[in-house]
Every structure is written in C-alpha cells, then in structure tokens.
Image (cartoon, coloured by chain):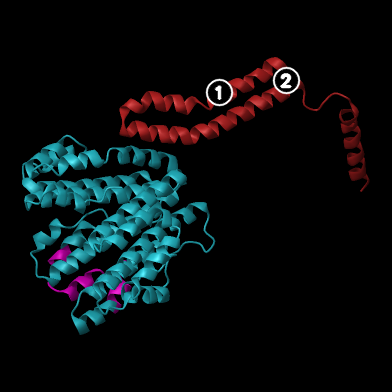
Amino acid sequence: MSAARGTANYEYVTSRVRSRGASLFDADDYRKLVRMGPGEIARFMEETEYEAEMNALGSRFEGVDLIEYALNRNLAKHFDDLLNWADGALYDYVARYLRKFDAWNVKTAFRGIYSDADPSEIEDDLITAGELSETLLSRLVDAGSIEEAVDLLDGTLFADALDEAYELYEQESLLVPLENAVDRAYYADLMANLPSEPNRAEELYLQFLRAEIDFRNLRNALRISRSGADIDPVEFYIDGGRLFDAATLRQLASNPDELVARVRESVYGDELDATLDELAEADDLIAFEHALDAALLSYSDTLSNRYPLSVCPVLAYVLAKEREVDNVRAIARGREAGLDPEEIETELVIA
Amino acid sequence: MLATTLALFSSIVSFAPILQSSAPGITGSAGAAIAVGLAALGAGIAERGIGAAAVGAVAEDDDMFGRGLIFTVLPETLVILALVTIFVV
C-alpha cells in the first residue's frame, strides 16, 4: 500500500483540494437547503458538483434515498481522487487516514449482522472509500455471524485486535469491545511506523491526528461524565493524543468542571473557548458535540492555513467533505421526517 | 620516484603562470554568465512548485489557466533581471 514512489507532490494536491474545498456548501447554501423538501434538495444538488451522481442514480432511486446514495458515491469518488493524485509520503498519509472508512464499514457490517439486518440494507450504508475491496465488503455483509465476519477480516489491519476482542464479545455478547477494537486498530495504524524523530512533514501529520484524537477522547469523556453511567472511560480511550493520557482521563471523566478547565488551558483553548462557555450555560450535550465538530473543523483550517504545503489541507478537506455529507443527509432526513428548519439547523455542523 | 618528482615539478611549472598572473581567474563576462545561469536555476526551482499547483488549479477549473500561467512565469523575472549583469560588465 505504501509502495508509492516519488516525492510528495504537495503543491499539486493542495491546489486541487483547495479548489474542491471552495465548492463545498457554505452557510448560505445550508440556509436554503433546510427550507427545501427532499425533491427540491435533489434538484438543488443536480446543479452543484453532485450533478454526475444525481444523473447516474436518478433513474433508479428517488427522494431521500437518491440523495443519500449520491452523497456516498460522491464522497467515495472524491477520496479516490485524492489517492490518485498523491505521490510519495503524501500518498502514504492520505491512504492511512482514509482507512477510517474501512473502520466505518467494518463497524457498520458488525452492527448490521448483530441486528440481523438485510445484507442489501447494510450494503447501502457502506462507503467504498477505504482499502478493503468491494468483494471483501460484500462477503462481510453476507456473513451469517459475527464470528464469520471476524474470520473474513483475517489479514487486514483489524485482524489482531478483533481476535482479542472477539473473546470479550463471546462472554458479554455486546458489540462495544469489537467496535472499540476496530477504532483502536485504526488509530494505532495511523501512528504506526513513523520514525522516532519525525521530520517536518511527519510532525504536521501527527499534529493533525493528535488534534483529532484529542477531540474524540474529549467527546467520549464528556459523554461518559454527563450520562453518569458507571463506565470506565479508559475502555474508550484512544492512545496518541496530547491532551490526556489514560490515567488523567479516568480522573477527569468523573469531574466535568476540571475537564473543561483542562481543555481551556490547552492548545485548543482559543478554538474551544466560546464552545465551552456554551456548554457551561446549556446542558445540551448534543449541541456541544456539534460545536466540538465545528471547532475541530476550524482548527484543521487554522493548521492548513498555517502550513499550506503539508498534509494538513488534504486532511482538512477530508474532514470538511465528511461534514458536508453528514449535514446534507441530516437535512434530507430531517425534512423527510417533517422537522422545522430551525430544528434541523441545530443539527448542522457549520464551521 | 624520480619520474613522480619530475611530473610534480613540471605541473607546478605549468600552473605557475596562471597563479602568478594578475588577471582574474573568472573574467567579467564569465561571471555574468554564471550569474544568469544561477538565476535561471533558481527560477526553475521556484517554477516547479508553482507550475504543479497551477496545473492542479487548471484541472479543477479551466478559468484558472490565465492566472496559473501568470503565476507560473512570475519567477522568470529573476532571469530577466539577471540578464542586466550581461550589459553591466
């Protein structure tokens, strides 16, 4: 996978990525979209860069399904393009990062099998932007049991972690250990095999990933501390961030105020200050999570403006594109369910 | 042994006039040529990155062709300025 030759072509890839980033929906587009019905949204998307997907799928599907398939296909297309453009070290970073969709697909397959969903329904939710082949994915969703699915994943980067977690699954018959194992394997692979003294490019790649891991840990810790459930936060802890280690996370999760104070002092303080104030006022965890996503987006933008010729703009684009797809899906589903525009707007993550 | 000493001596003799002559080792026009050459090299290195970025931008949006071209040849001014040295010396 990392056999790409040549030097990293940051100039070429970042300029293409920035151009594509500029054509993402902005706040105005979202304001229009939340006031449309599913049919109107589909027509709106036909006039944007989703045109090709809408035309290709328009005869087979309609309404919200059409929108959803078009979104997923467009996402996969863009991320495949990233891999086509990138060379050398940049290719390696992007490929590692995009395995996020492998993790997503594996988790979706597990959940589908666990809940006895129809294979074709599971397949609809897969995003074919990762490394796992389509053959493997379709065998995965057709698997009769979790055990079969774990066996199928033999030889992938998830194999070792899943083998361990499968014993826990057998004891408790809960999916959580398996899902955590998938996430951990993904994040471990992201950081693996980097030299102990990283050069500038590797350092920026790490800086970006650390931010993402920190935000993830923070969200998990807040969820646990808010829900008041008796869960060990370390079970969900992902190694590699710079904000928490496992011990401090366990200690802070039981004390939300200290957790917030800790974040305020951190490097993300500037991005998160307003968000944290909001959290202190309202006890709305969902709003805070969206604000956290928005803060990660704006932090990734900061990084990509500060280091224009690095992997940061590319990863920032991946994040922003994902958010856009999530937003449009939320709008379409929300309108289908008859929610108010104001209600849907609170569900959107706009940087 | 004798042959090597002789060869050494003869090479010193043949270099001696150059080392002792008051004319500079690099003449004025040669210096100007080196200046232009280095400037062109620098411009080439600068254009490598800009050109790659410009091609990327044009691939996404054809309207960027003109702007991309302008930015790509901007370092070329280095070479044009360096040409002045030819006329100065």
Chain corresponding to red in the figure: B
Q: Chain of mark 1?
A: B
Which stretch appears magenta? A139-164
Q: Amino acid at mark 1?
A: Thr
Q: Which residue is mark 2?
A: B29
Which residue corresponds to the image point at 20% horizontal and 53% vertical from the top-left? A347
The answer to whether residue A238 of the structure is visible from this angle is no
Chain corresponding to cyan in the figure: A
Which residue corresponds to the image point at 59% horizontal and 24% vertical from the top-left? B79
- x and y, in percent, of residue A261 in the image: 41, 65
- Nearer-N-terminus badge (2/1): 2
Callout 2: helix, strand or loop?
helix
Residue positioned most to the front: A281
Few, some or many C-alpha atoms within 10 Å of disc 1 (few <14, some 14-19, many ≥20)? few
Few, some or many C-alpha atoms within 10 Å of disc 2 (few <14, some 14-19, many ≥20)? some
- x and y, in percent, of residue B59 in the image: 33, 33
Which residue corresponds to the image point at 28% horizontal and 59% vertical from the top-left? A288
Q: Which mark is residue B77?
A: 1
- x and y, in percent, of residue A263 in the image: 40, 63
Cβ–Cβ below 8 Å for labels 2 and 1?
no
The answer to whether residue A321 of the structure is visible from this angle is yes
Q: Chain of mark 2?
A: B
Image-quadrant location for residue A130: bottom left
> Relative to residue B53, is residue A338 depicted above or below?
below
